[in-house]
Image (tube, coloured by chain):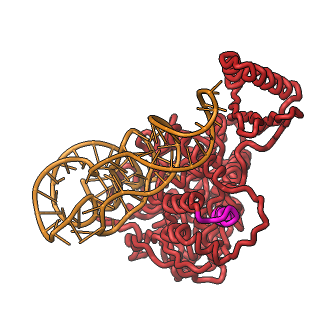
Chain colours: A red, B orange
Amino acid sequence: MKHDFYLFNTAGRVKELFRAAHNEVGMYCCGPTVYNYAHIGNLRTYIFEDVLKRTLQALGYKVRHVVNITDVGHLTSDEDSGDDKMEKGAIREGKSVWDIAAFYTKRFQDDLKALNITDPTRWPKATAHIDQMISMISDLERKGFTYRTNDGIYFDTTRFPSYCDFAGLDPETLRAGERVEMGEKRAVTDFALWKFSPSDKKRQMEWESPWGVGFPGWHIECSAMSAEYLPLPIDIHCGGADHIRVHHTNEIAQSEAASGKKFVNYWVHGEFLVIDKGKMAKSGENFVTLEVLKKKGFSALSYRMFCYTAHYRNPLSFSWDSLSAAENALVNLRKAVPQQDSSEHVENDVIETILTPFFNAVCDDLNMPRAMAALWDILKNGSLSLMQKRVAAERADTILGLDLTQRAADAYTYSSDDEKRIVVYSLRELDTGVCDGIFEKVRLRRAARANKDFAGADRLRNELVNLGLTVKDLPDGTTEITFSS
RNA sequence: GGCGGCAUAGCCAAGUGGUAAGGCAGAAGUCUGCAAAACUUUCAUCUCCAGUUCAAAUCUGGAUGCCGCCUCCA
């Protein structure tokens, strides 16, 4: 499929034509710190990254995709000598930090699977790459980019003149010590590469290093692991918009200082999911997980659908009503995809033509709202054949990942042997007793209708409705019963 | 305090100069004993003010409101 693909590059703040630097596109996405469940705001970013990856693949690129797992403890800030999030989580749950990391890593990966997010090529853990981090810090030390303070080894940002370019910072206006103690740090922008373990207590995670026992700074892991698995410059590096200012600025500095090469060609950042006008945070009642969402009866893919209502670079307002709207839309969309009931041959060229507006939208910096509108247009277009619509939807779904060919409620189907059949659709397996009970009520209702006892017929239908069923009298006389949830 | 972003119908939102995508909800109609489903139709002048222009939601200036980053954070 030949399409020019445009991506908004945070470096430079403009939409650019994507050109791969390698045969296999290198894509690095900042992963989670596994000290707690991911909330749906976090998940929004991974959904957008998955769409980006699927798009590249649909355009014919091979993609080498790396997502890190931050399972090492970092302090609540560079200067804080107190507990870090991993250790806090461990204390909170009475487990070791290693158990905490393993548990939440698994939970995170389960969430991604439920959302149809495809697995990355590699999934490196920070704790398995301490050697690479130490080696990179040593390189930086050798090249004169570091200095030592009483609590760690720091990166000297004054030695890296272009430090402020990426985020458009003005060092003069940064407020030194406003929110975080400077300690012995020389410049506001300097950051820790290696932190020494506190002398008065034993950390659960700490390692030997040329500078003493301690643990790595937060930023170094992404630099070390991306260099380990991807050739520089990395084609695409993704993350949440909150990372632009500090994390990615620091990554660029240390990676380029250590390697002498350009670090990343395209920086792509996703905006936040907002709730009650603020961003979703891992503390407080704003914390909505996929688990919570499922408990309320929503499917994970409804959330994926919801994410397509807005562009990834704009904040998206979450509410249960709007999620519910997306779920209805997904159900309707699946209904609009014709069943495979014909052997009509569909030419690939025809499908590509049909899908042109869809791909134009996707390739314009992943404009999914427009892409979805294009898909609706296709499915409502009366001049296309059913098979053309179906094949087009299947093709679009390789990017959307919405299981569009799945029917809403056809997991289990039960039919009566009446002359005019009674068909029951359910997502769950039903006891024969339950099924027979439903059949019996329908037969009674049919009898009432035949006798023009419409009040009685409606009463019987209401009984079924109250059980959570919908009742449809089809033109051919069959009665269709669907469990609504 | 610095930097960045946003303000479009009941809700979620596209749209960066030529007269408002799409979805959800709602309304009307066809169909139905009534429903359900389906189909058809319908539903905004874009926070406010002042400019530029033949033409602005889209550009400029101002006002108001809101959010994010600057600390770990998707």
Residue B32: image quadrant is top right
Q: Is residue A393 inside the magenta stretch?
A: yes
Q: Which residues are magenta?
A: A383-396
Q: Quadrant of the N terminus of chain A?
A: bottom right
The x, y position of residue A199, in whole percent, is 59, 49
Nearer the observer, A215 or A355:
A355
Say whether residue A227 is visible.
no
Nearer the observer, A443 or A324:
A443
The x, y position of residue A67, in whole percent, is 64, 63
Say whether residue A372 is visible.
yes
Nearer the observer, A45 or A359:
A359
Q: Quadrant of the C terminus of chain A?
A: top right
Q: Is residue A406 inside the magenta stretch?
A: no
Q: Residue at x 51, y 80 (%)?
A: A262
Q: Is residue A463 above or below residue A110?
A: above
Q: Residue at x 83, y 23 (%)?
A: A440
The x, y position of residue B47, in whole percent, is 25, 47
Nearer the observer, A298 or A94:
A298
Give the side of residue A423 with respect to residue A310, left or right. Answer: right
Residue A396: image quadrant is bottom right
Q: Main secondary structure of the magenta part?
A: helix
Give the side of residue A447 with respect to residue B54, left or right. Answer: right
Q: Residue at x 77, y 59 (%)?
A: A341
Q: Is residue A105 above or below residue A152?
A: above
Q: How many marks?
A: 0
Q: Residue at x 54, y 60 (%)?
A: A377
The x, y position of residue A39, in whole percent, is 58, 45
